[in-house]
Amino acid sequence: MTEATKIDSTVLWGVKNIARAIGKPPRGVYHLLETGRLPARKIGRQWIATKEALDRFFADQVGGQ
């Protein structure tokens, strides 16, 4: 596999995987995704996010309080 075809292991595919990564129930995560409150995008019918983007998002939330 070439470098261009590798998929970064930090990409989280699907609401369940995103929810597991942030320790929240899938139903609540789905709501946050649909309302644009989490840094993710939808490809077709599948939500994807990166671990780094989620980490940055939550670090900014904690730092801004």
Image (tube, rainbow, N blue to C red):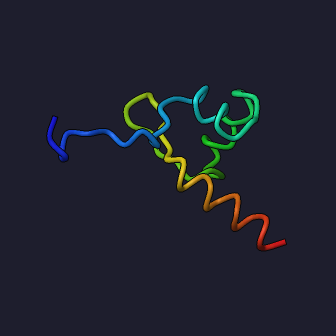
Residue 50 horizontal/vertical position (percent): 49, 47
Q: Nearer the viewer, residue 57 or 46?
A: 57
* Frontmost residue, 31 versus 40: 40
Q: Is residue 34 above or below residue 52?
A: above
Q: Quadrant of the C terminus?
A: bottom right
> Residue 34 lies in what quarter of the image?
top right
Vertically, is 59 above or below 63?
above
Question: In terms of image quadrants, where is residue 45?
Answer: top left
Q: Please state the horizontal and vertical placement of residue 47, each as a whole percent of the image.
A: 49, 35
Picture coordinates of residue 6, whole percent (x, y) = 25, 39
Outermost residue, right direction?
Answer: 65
Residue found at the far left of this picture: 2
Which residue: 76% across, 35% down? 24
Task: Assign the N terminus to one quadrant of the image.
Answer: top left
- Above-or-below relation of 60 to 17: below
- Picture residue at 69% right of the left edge, 27% below the top: 26
In the rendered view, tell whether residue 3 sits above or below residue 44: below
- Residue 62 lies left or right of residue 55; in this view the side is right
Q: Residue at x 37, y 31 (%)?
A: 44
